[in-house]
Image: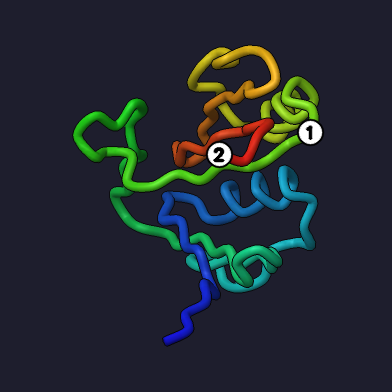
Amino acid sequence: MEMRLTQLVFECEDPEVVALFWQRVLDLEPPQGEPDWLTLQWQPVGRFSFHRVEGYQAPTWPGANGQQHVHFDLLVEDLQKASFAVMEAGGAPLTAVLNPGPKAWRIFADPAGHPFCLVTVPE
């Protein structure tokens, strides 16, 4: 049986803020939809959507007891440049650069608190 990911959905308090952050970070076209559900078109997954949830609580980092739910890694060529772009867009660093050198990576959170990593090696 073949399966293919067609949509990634982030729950959040303010879909517009989170969608505009990811639009800027991933250099995508503006989000489409309604105030409670906005979607970006992103080739690796198809649709990247943001769903308003009343009483939303951001995941914690580190999520020792499963509080982070899920995170993904974004492969970048220049960690310093990419980190700056993420912070300029409104992302918050959760760590300093880890494993400095050819396999460097850094953990960030988007405006809704979803953790993600910038990595220089796809591991």
Count all numbered tags in the image, as a single digit.
2
Name the one closer to the observer, 110 or 62: 62
- Taking the spot 48% from the left edge, 66% from the top edge, the residue there is 36
10 Å neighbourhood of mark 2: few (<14), some, or many (≥20)? few
Nearer to us in this view, 123 or 92: 123
Q: Residue at x 68, y 40 (%)?
A: 75
Question: Which x, y percent locates residue 55?
Answer: 29, 49
Q: Secondary structure at mark 2?
A: loop
Identify the residue at horizontal 33%, vertical 39% (top origin): 68
The disc at residue 86 is none
Q: Residue furthest left?
A: 65
Q: Give the image location of residue 23, x and y in percent.
A: 71, 52
> What label sits on residue 123 in the rendered view?
2
Q: Are marks 1 and 2 in contact (CB under 8 Å)?
A: no
Above or below for 9 versus 2: above
Given residues 12 and 69, the one toward you in this image is 69
Along the viewing direction, whichever of 122 and 45 lies nearer the viewer: 122
Quadrant housing the C terminus: top right
Residue, disc 1: 77
Classify mark 1: helix, strand or loop: loop
